[in-house]
Image (tube, rainbow, N blue to C red):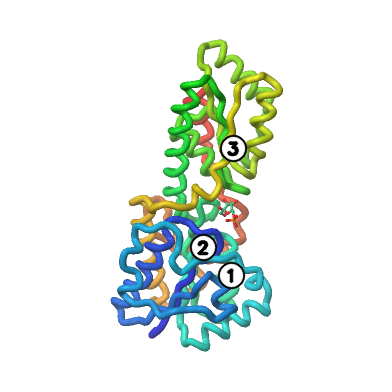
Amino acid sequence: MRRIAVLTSGGDCSGMNPAIRAVVRTALAKGIDVVGIQRGYRGLIDRQYEMLHHQSVSNTLQRGGTFLQSARCKEMMSPAGQAIAVETLEGIGIEGLVVIGGDGSLRGAKALHERGIKTIGIPASIDNDIPFTDMSLGVDTALNNICYAVDCLKDTASSHDRTFVVETMGRGSGYLALTAAVACGAEFALIPEVEFDLDAICEILRRRFKDGRNNSLILVAEGAASAKEIADQIKDRIHFETRLMVLGHYQRGGSPTAFDRLLACRFGMTAVEALLAGESGKMIGLTKSEIQLTELDKVISEKTRPIDQMLVKLGEIMDR
Ligand code: F6P
């Protein structure tokens, strides 16, 4: 293998830069050229790429986002778009590709593998909804970002006897809302995986108030409900002074945590080694602290990553 390519695709997250760096430096150490594809699969469609050298990834380890940039590329879902992508890769002599991204990006990786491009995926999405890995890149940094924000809100909530409703990202996954609720001692986490009863929540809030616990925090995953509606409903039903915070894209940025940097290094190096060993159509994952490879077929056909019931229990026992 003489030349490989790397791209970051879908929603960006912290940890993508260190993963690119690990891919580049591992490949260069083995005498392999690396091409960086710009803006994910869009760069394959529009033929935008650059050669990456040792220096190209200097000073990127601690930076959030992705210096190659990312995009959500609809064309990659169609056979015509995939054919252009293969043409671009073959045109520049790419013998192996590393795709860093979430669920949709891994589907693209699988399509390229099926079209004969040796491809390895690295899971990267703050949602932590990708199966066959305990953690995806970016999750730990996003969780720490949320914890920082929620701790700040707790200070002001307790100074004013207020209920704060905080919306986290996670269209189909409550991982961030639930783990942040446990890590920050929030009273409730409303997540798409578990039904909730707002009447019961209001009752608990009222009971807490009677017991002298006058401030509360409710974390809402965006896929479970609109935080604004929850805040309005609480105000209407029990007349609590309520404030709203939608954390939005703040969660996705910032310097990657040490955990994400180390995970990115391990994922990136393993991806290159896997390509050199002749592997393709697989995703690198972290299972019980071990780095493992799983067929992209299996990753994609598995519906969702189940929510950890211990976290649900912890949330109920520790914080009400
Ligand atoms: O999939 C990652 C994610 O951050 C989701 O949690 C969120 O719903 C979505 O991306 C936001 O997408 P965009 O950056 O395109 O607005």
Q: What label does residue 317 carry, if any?
A: none
Is disc 1's CB within 8 Å of ligand 1? no
Q: Which quadrant of the view contains residue 46?
A: bottom right
Against 80, is 40 above or below?
above
- Where is residue 102 drawn, in percent x and y? 54, 60
Local packing at callout 2 (Cα closer than 10 Å; few below 14, some 14-19, many 20+) is many
Horizontal side of residue 297 vs 26, given as left or right:
right
Amino acid type at circle 3 is: Val
Give the SS element for disc 2: strand
Q: What label does residue 101 carry, if any?
A: 2
Q: Which residue is mark 3?
A: 220
Local packing at callout 1 (Cα closer than 10 Å; few below 14, some 14-19, many 20+) is many
Front residue (pair 256, 183): 256
Local packing at callout 3 (Cα closer than 10 Å; few below 14, some 14-19, many 20+) is many
Q: Which residue is mark 1?
A: 108
- Where is residue 277 drawn, in percent x and y? 39, 76
- Where is residue 309 drawn, in percent x and y? 53, 37
Q: Residue at x 43, y 53 (%)?
A: 287
Viewer-nearest of discs 1 and 3: 3
Q: CA distance from mark 2 to mark 3?
A: 24 Å
